[in-house]
Amino acid sequence: MIPELGHYALVLALVLALAQATVPMVGAARGIRPWMQLARPAALAQFVFVAFAFIALMHAFAVSDFSVAIVTQHSHSDQPLIYRLSATWGNHEGSLLLWVLILTVFGALVALFGENLPPRLKARTLSIQAMISVGFLLFMLLTSNPFARLNPAPMQGNELNPLLQDPGLALHPPMLYLGYVGFSIVFSFAVAALIDGKVDAAWARWVRPWCLLSWTTLTGGIALGSWWAYNELGWGGWWFWDPVENASFMPWLIGTALLHSALVVEKRDALKSWTILLSILTFGFALLGTFLVRSGIITSVHAFADDPTRGVFILALLAIAIGVPLSLYALRAPALRGGGLFAPLSREGALVMNNLLLATMTATVLLGTLYPLLLELATGSTISVGGPFYMATFGVLALPLLIVMAIGPFLGWKRGDVRGALQRLTVAGISALGAAIIAVWIQGDGPIMAPLGMFVGVWLMVGTLVEFMERIRLFDGDAGRVWSRARHLPRAAYGMTLAHLGLAIAVIGMTGAGAWKSEEVKVLQPGQSLTLQGYEFKLERVGGVRGENYLAEQAHFTVSRGGSFVADLYPERRQYMVQPAPTTEAAIHTMPLADLYAVIGEPDGKGGWLVRIYHEPLVGWIWFGALVMVAGGLTSLSDRRYRVGAPVRAAATQAAKA
Amino acid sequence: MSRKRLRLYLVLATLVVLGIATTLVLRALNEELVFFLSPTQIAEKQPDAGRQIRLGGLVEAGSVEKSGETVAFSVTDLSSNVRVTYRGLLPDLFREGQGVVVQGAFDGNGRFVASEVLAKHDETYMPPEVAKALKESGRWQETEGKGTAQPVVTQ
């Protein structure tokens, strides 16, 4: 009964979305206030119905109702509750419902907190948002009904893929979706502004919190996914340039560009039409990602089972959702002209550079993702594009981006003093050079990207710190006055400092882990040991342990260095109840400068075990950096001036300060 | 700074960045692509030693030999096969008779040394490249592998 109610709720949500998509739009065009005001209750009710459907589905998973097809396919009654619940979005239908839920959450938030938006803009934005809902609700109801029943119902289910039974992965999809579906609202604002024909500083301020929120959660979601891969896959890797990873990374890159160009619109009233274009493209990339993942056209470790009708449906959605706004853009963008002029060497100039490089980097990722597909269509030969391709394109383009990133904040709006900025960055330059020399000294004749990566990472880190110290004039006046200056600095400034600092930390981590990872594979008898990078790993014993829904062989390593104890490691090889294949559970010891990573393989039949040990320098910095970036996003989001619904007047007066 | 002048600078900057990017991409496409080959294609023309390729097919039943840290096995598309050696941990789902994709290169002595044996998340999953290779060798049975692919979702 509950599943049917859930299904029914989705149909009602579709009807509401249809009303919300049309009536306020017409109302805005004809100036009929009550029609425009319909958007608010419709958005709220739509959210309530979709949320009800989502809870109904979660309930089916929680109580293991195997008469629901996807519960049978993806859950098992012995799974711990958290993984029964996370199984709700561990499949195509359920994750699509989550997608739509988040879409309606954002609609409802704008309806609730958009009090001081101009009524026309608000009505149109919510109407566009509802059009996206219509598309996805139709997609779900026509091709992927999450509530489809099985008759007769089986006694037991197939279990969630054991690899997905991990706390990081329980959270990863919701975070990621918050990010990339969040950009839908920015998209809706952009299309609404195109229809209005007006983009100004106020528009940029309304859009900013949504953009920041999406960027922050997307950053967190991508980092969690990579953290999961590192912990769970047992390969010691954290990024594979897999098409599905790229699918989430492209909206992040373009979204980052958008975040910065919106800043120029807000402060200087320039780059308007470019910002609108980025808003459309960011969500376009999110849709493209959805298409790539769900159509099965791309070979990926993450891919869903392929179903051509779904692929065609999403492709059609993509074509409409991008094609129509882009046509509208072509018609209206020339009218958006105007705004402040600036010298090429200025804060605006640096942000243009940021946008240009980010957009180009996105294009290289897009090319690498789609090229195998296009080549196969054209010539029939199958190829794969891996890490080396991206290092030689994306990686190289990232270098100037990171260089400019440290300089930009020192430049003034309109006209910047680059010489002065570089002088103030002397310390950063010297530190960066030092780091590069140390890198060369460590690695001998290793990859050239390692010292370059260290150079730009340290350059950005020190540059960002120097900029912050100058802002609060750390060495000017007594501690009390410095403290007071620090307190009065807007939160957005702290946000920028943290986000840039976080990226610098992550870049240093990626460079170290990418270039200097080392590994050793060996068969060990209990009592024997192997040595890697000065760490001695002694296999003490291997024994059986029992988890809630699996059996495992667990190895015990003691790690020591120069005779003194470092850590105990307990990697496992797990056999889950239902799925026949064993899975490896790596054991990881994290230290400030490196991780030790141990995996246990199969016994050799003679009392020995195949073991694999990795030494991963600086790898922990990647996720620490991501965490700092997320903290930066949240700090900026808490800035009073951007608080959703903040009085427009206050925003205008304070804008001058930053 | 006139509007015209500003636009000129913007266009120049764009051209420079795009030019650099295009050069990088073309170079990388030349050097860094990894082609996927089936055992039959390799039997017809063995790739140059040292050139990275991906090889896909089925792990031939009874062909797996383990000795210490190294393992040797044959990858077959049921018409030809290629002997592969690999040093390291095999993925959990590695089985005789199952689809596999290995990345590596031929050494100077005509032996294929794998640097990576690609793990697939699911034991009933047939990598599409493998299915394609099997189809091309004419040994594909429609009942096998197809439709049993279970979705694996991480997002």
Image (tube, coloured by chain):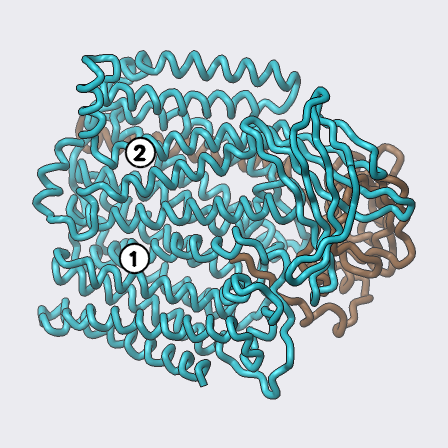
Chain colours: A cyan, B brown
Taking depth in this image into account, of A477 and B143 the one nearest to the observer is: A477
Going 14% across and 67% down the picture, which residue do you hit?
A28
Dot 1 falls on a residue whose secondary structure is: helix
Residue under mark 2: which chain is it in?
A: A
Taking depth in this image into account, of A21 and A330 the one nearest to the observer is: A21
Taking depth in this image into account, of A406 and B82 the one nearest to the observer is: A406
User: Does any portion of residue B47 appear in the rendered image?
Assistant: no
Residue at numbered disc 2: A496
Going 19% across and 24% down the picture, which residue do you hit?
A485
Dot 2 falls on a residue whose secondary structure is: helix
Residue at numbered disc 1: A185
Taking depth in this image into account, of A299 and A506 the one nearest to the observer is: A506
* Residue A655 percent across, percent down from the top left: 14, 37
User: Is B32 rendered above or below residue A156?
Assistant: above
User: Is A626 rendered above or below residue A282?
Assistant: above
Label 1 neighbourhood size at 10 Å, few (<14), some (14-19), many (20+)?
Answer: many
Q: Amino acid at mark 1?
A: Ile
Image-based side of A283 in relation to A19, left or right:
right
Q: Alpha carbon of mark 1 to alpha carbon of mark 2: how far?
A: 23 Å
Give the mark, 1 or 2, whose residue is nearer the N terminus. Answer: 1
Label 2 neighbourhood size at 10 Å, few (<14), some (14-19), many (20+)?
Answer: some
User: Does any portion of residue A359 appear in the rendered image?
Assistant: yes
Residue under mark 1: which chain is it in?
A: A
* Quarter of the rendering occupied by the N terminus of chain A: bottom left
